[in-house]
Amino acid sequence: MRKTLILAALLAAAPVAASAAEEMSYTYVEGGLTQVRVDDDFLDDPRANGGYVRGSFAIAKQVNVFGGYSQVSDKYRVYGARLKYELAQPELGIGYHMNMSDRVDFTADIAWVRLNAEVKISGVPGYNGTYKDHTNAARALLGVRGKPSPRTEAWLKAGAIDGSDIDSEFVGVLGGQVKFNKTWGLVAEVQLMNDVSQFSTGVRASF
């Protein structure tokens, strides 16, 4: 009788344990490679490559803070001029999430984003040198994050970015993760904004 009661208790607890194992973590660190593509006919659609790091930390059951930094660069020639272009992007924000079902969360986040651009020009008398510029912007996104299977995640976000030198523009984000175990996973993400596309792939450690 005692063994039967113990077995029944274990079976009753199993769905709860499985559900807990499927919860998505909002505390993680991540790093990898990134590429920025610009739709520009004059520069023949330049592509800049580099790397990124970012992380998130849950400060409450439904609230997390996050930050990141990416930097890309490229070299190309335009009508005899040699140009080296570098773009750095730090960001810092806060997010909110709410369960819509056992496998899907509604997400919302807002972030401060700074775009630092640097161009080095050579081969053009009178214009050779280094030119720098920057702009600050705010980005707000709404979306969903879910688990199609126990070892995969996917997220979709849409919103807008607006800043001192940026008119309000649409931003879309699509990403996913394949988990090797509870901690480690491979992530990939694409972010679309007007004429700029950013593709990233890296490794995430969730806690």
Image (spheres, rainbow, N blue to C red):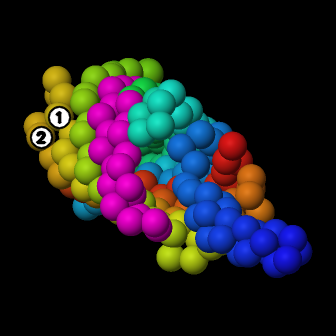
Mark 1 Cα within 10 Å, few/some/many (few <14, many 20+)?
some
Closest to the observer: 172 or 64?
A: 64
Look at the image and tell me in which quarter the C terminus lies.
Answer: top right
Residue 51 appears anywhere in the view: no
Is 106 part of what is drawn in magenta? yes
Spatial separation of the CA atoms under disc 1 and disc 2: 4 Å
Position of 76 compared to 99: left or right? right
User: Predominant secondary structure in magenta?
Assistant: strand
**Kind of residue at badge 1:** Asp
Q: Is residue 84 above or below residue 113?
A: below
Nearest the viewer among 48 and 7 is: 7
Q: What residue is at 62 percent from the left and 42 percent from the top?
A: 28
Residue that mark 1 sits on: 162
- Other-residue count near label 2 (Cα within 10 Å), few / some / many at <14 / 14–19 / ≥20: some
Disc 2 designates what residue?
168
Q: Amino acid at mark 2?
A: Ser
Q: Position of residue 91 (x, y in %)?
A: 42, 30
Q: Quadrant of residue 106?
A: bottom left
Q: Are dots 1 and 2 in contact, CB under 8 Å?
A: yes
Query: Which residue is at 26% across, 50% downward?
Result: 142
Question: Would you say residue 46 sits in the magenta stretch?
Answer: no
Disc 2 secondary structure class: loop
| Magenta segment boundaries in residue numbering | 94-117
Q: Nearer the viewer, residue 162 or 109?
A: 109
In what quadrant of the picture does the N terminus appear?
bottom right
Q: Is residue 174 left or right of residue 137?
A: right
**Residue 34 in the image: x percent, y percent?**
55, 52
